[in-house]
Image: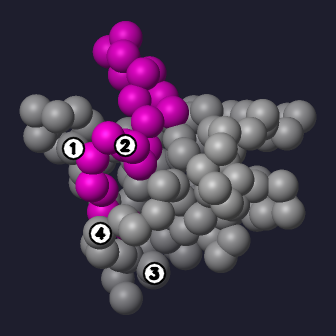
Amino acid sequence: MRSRAIAQSSETITAARAFLEPESNYARWYRCAIVISGQRWLYPDPGRATLRFDYWERQSPGFSIKPFEPPIVPVTGQYEILYFDELGNRLNAPVGKALVMLEPLVKIPCDRTGLLMG
């Protein structure tokens, strides 16, 4: 599938995978947070339906750590990683595992106005 090939060819996403997968014994899901124009955004957005990297509608509360699900974010930048257990409870970030550089794999709306970024 084209989207998986894009994810596998991205050095940034490969590095994010190496950064996150060791935490699979600690957490099940993750979300990414970034400040854009003074507003903090979460991906995936817990308040609305979102698409996965393969364009299927998300059925989970976050991106899977293992098996690794590439994050879908609107812009390249340093993201705060929010960790969650199997039940969706927020966990503290392990030491040194709170920030990671990410890049868009596909174009997604940056905000609820539908402005596409990526």
- In the rendered structure, does residue 47 fall within the stretch colored magenta? yes
Residue 5 disc label: 3
The reply to whether residue 80 is visible in this rendering is yes
Is 68 located above or below residue 36 in the figure? below
Q: Secondary structure at mark 4?
A: loop
- Compute the Cα span from label 2 to label 1: 11 Å
| Residue 36 in which image quadrant | top left
Which residues, given as a range, are shown in magenta?
Answer: 33-52
Q: Position of residue 64 (x, y in %)?
A: 59, 65
**Which residue is at 54% across, 45% downward?**
31
**Residue 16 coordinates in the image, percent (x, y):** 66, 55
First along the sequence among labels 1 and 3: 3
Q: Quadrant of residue 68?
A: bottom right
Q: Secondary structure at mark 2?
A: loop
What is the crowding at mark 4: few (fewer than 14 residues within 10 Å), some, or many (at least 20)?
few
Could you classify mark 1 by the number of other residues whose Cα lies within 10 Å: few (under 14), some (14-19), or many (20 or more)? few
**Distance between mark 1 and mark 3 Cα atoms:** 22 Å
**Which secondary structure, mark 3?**
helix
Q: Tag 1, which secondary structure? A: strand
- Please name the amino acid that badge 1 sits on: Pro
Q: Is residue 10 above or below residue 81?
A: below
Badge 4 is on which residue?
57
